[in-house]
Amino acid sequence: MSENAKKKILLVDDEKHLLMSLKDYLTFEEFEVLTARSGEEALKALEKAAPDLIVLDISMPGMGGVGFLRRISNEHGIPRYPVLVLTARSAMREFFDTVEVDGFLEKPCDESDLLAKIRKIFVHRMGPGVAGERGRQRILLAEDDASVADRLCEALRDAGYDVEVARSGPEALEKATMVKPSLIVMKEILPRLNGSAAASLIEVMPSVSTIPVILYDETRAGSPEAGSRRRDVKRVRRVLHTSDSAEVVKAVSDAL
């Protein structure tokens, strides 16, 4: 079985013939393909299945692609699913440079170009070497307390993730460049370099700058400073005020 067969794609476009041809092509490439002809249909599809990628047209009747994006985004404007925008409205490219989508393609495009873009997104999301036999996503956990690290590792592995552990801020930076995780979960108070400072450095390191980060900080629950860290560092998706295993796993799931 091809690795593609494990990936589910939701195609959202009001052009019936395009949907049919793309579904046929991607099914031949061994993806599982769902279709919707409007944002409203796509929302109903998401109630039944969680896709690994949404390929989204913008110009559609009803809420349209932009309205659909808003509906599937969290309070920070970040979509809860990977999204590839496929649209004839080339003038919107600059708009989507400022929106947290995974890619932008102009119509018309060759099917081979679409396939290459889809594969690139999956490699980027999973990280090199992560989409292997099991196709498990890898999480880098930065935690210096061994008992907390063991507890979080167990919960994340039970949820189906591979986990790499770092014991300090500098070690988290080093391992991030080595293992290219899908997501980094960092304690705020770490030896030699705090989590928010490490996240700021990650943001400007080309090889890891696109990796999302979750911070957790039990010592400053609800403080304005914790909130400002989240706003100031683009890659920080959430700041948790707990290291509770269930809360961390949920945040990881939402971010991915």
Image: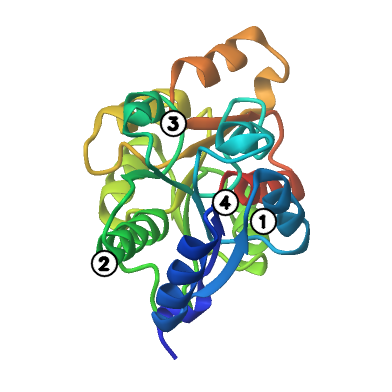
Dot 3 falls on a residue whose secondary structure is loop
Residue denoted by label 4? 14
Dot 1 falls on a residue whose secondary structure is helix
Mark 3: which amino acid?
Arg
**Disc 2 and disc 1 in contact, CB within 8 angstroms:** no
Distance between the Cα atoms at labels 4 and 1?
47 Å
Residue denoted by label 1? 151
The structure residue drawn at horizontal position 66% and vertical position 44%, both measured from the top left corner, is 39
Give the number of the disc on residue 112.
2
Q: Nearer the viewer, mark 4 or mark 1?
A: 4
Colour scheme shown = rainbow
Q: Is residue 157 left or right of residue 193?
A: right
**Residue count near mark 2 (Cα–Cα under 10 Å), binned few <14, some 14–19, many ≥20:** few
Q: Nearer the viewer, mark 1 or mark 3?
A: 3
Q: Quadrant of residue 204?
A: top left
**Disc 1 and disc 3 in contact, CB within 8 angstroms:** no
Tell which of 210 and 192 is nearer to you.
Answer: 210
The image shows residue 236 at horizontal and vertical percentages of 49, 30
Residue denoted by label 3? 235
Going from N to C along the chain, the mark reached first, 4 or 2, is 4
Q: Is residue 97 left or right of residue 163?
A: left
Mark 1: which amino acid?
Arg
**Disc 3 and disc 4 in contact, CB within 8 angstroms:** no
Going from N to C along the chain, the mark reached first, 3 or 2, is 2
